[in-house]
């Protein structure tokens, strides 16, 4: 881990109801600025739930999540929405691009909420990132007009457009063919350094996991070193 902690997950527990067994049962994690982490484990073990709790999409049943020293588990309403929009970037297995919008318009959507970068700066950054990931010639195409790998690269750019400090990716290569998955894996590693963004990736892909600076396994509701 490098530098001061960016993310602190402290004794986090999560259950879908008071009567259900916990999915997360005392998870502790510290992530530094620019660190990269792969979370592995069998299907259904709670990996996506962990990402959702860290990303404030789910509230833990107990414990705390702090990002840059700010306790996310205490935030409500607009303050919580601002953190999701400006400090955390999300990438999912399904790209979730709007089919009626162009690639460029999809990338710019997160900049329309709150007090983000101004429109000219946002457009410049979008074009720069699209060029960086090889999509500058596809910027005005709609998602249905480009390949699956290109759609997922567009989703990566959208996640980075507001310069988040933390990027969360849930099986980002899961729906891609081998060549596209390899390309995206390498791209994520490069952007981790170029964009100075910390990264947590949930994945079953050993090749992608091995490119991260750390690998942890989620088992019986807790994180541990798989070795």
Image (spheres, rainbow, N blue to C red):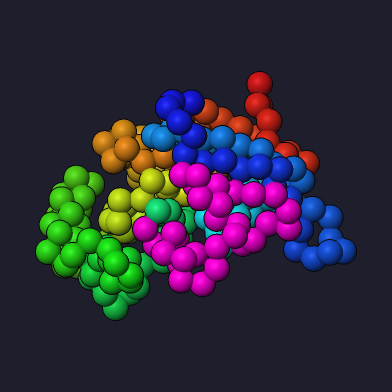
| Residue 118 spot, x, y in % from top left | 18, 65
Q: Which residues are magenta?
A: 58-86
Rendered position, 73 above or below 197: below
Q: For residue 174, say whether it is visible.
A: no
Q: Residue at x 55, y 68 (%)?
A: 76
Numbered label tally: 0
| Residue 223 spot, x, y in % from top left | 68, 36
Q: Nearer the viewer, residue 45 or 173?
A: 45
Image-quadrant location for residue 216: top right
Q: Residue at x 46, y 44 (%)?
A: 68
Q: Residue at x 75, y 63 (%)?
A: 16
**Residue furthest to the bottom:** 100
User: For this view, does 96 lie left or right of residue 146?
Assistant: right
Rendered position, 62 above or below 220: below
- Does the stretch in magenta take in 171? no
**Residue furthest to the right:** 19
């Amino acid at each position: 881990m490098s530098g001061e902690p960016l993310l602190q997950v402290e004794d986090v527990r999560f259950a879908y109801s008071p009567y259900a067994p916990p999915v997360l049962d005392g998870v502790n994690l510290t992530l530094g600025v620019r660190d990269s982490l792969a979370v592995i484990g069998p299907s259904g073990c709670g990996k996506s739930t962990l990402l959702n709790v860290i990303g404030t999409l789910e509230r833990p049943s107990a414990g705390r999540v702090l990002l840059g020293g700010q306790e996310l588990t205490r935030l409500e309403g607009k303050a919580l929405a601002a953190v999701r929009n400006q400090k955390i970037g999300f990438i999912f297995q399904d790209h979730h691009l709007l089919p009626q919008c162009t690639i460029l318009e999809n990338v710019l959507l997160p900049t329309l909420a709150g007090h983000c970068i101004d429109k000219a700066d946002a457009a410049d950054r979008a074009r720069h990132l699209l060029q960086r990931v090889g999509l500058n010639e596809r910027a005005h195409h709609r998602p249905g007009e480009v390949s699956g790998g290109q759609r997922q690269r567009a989703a990566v750019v959208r996640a980075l457009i507001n310069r988040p400090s933390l990027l969360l990716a849930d099986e980002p290569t899961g729906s891609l063919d081998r060549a596209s998955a390899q390309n995206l894996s390498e791209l994520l590693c490069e952007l981790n350094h170029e964009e100075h963004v910390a990264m947590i990736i949930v994945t079953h892909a050993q090749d992608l996991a091995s490119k991260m600076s750390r690998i942890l396994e989620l088992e019986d509701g807790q994180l541990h070193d798989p070795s």
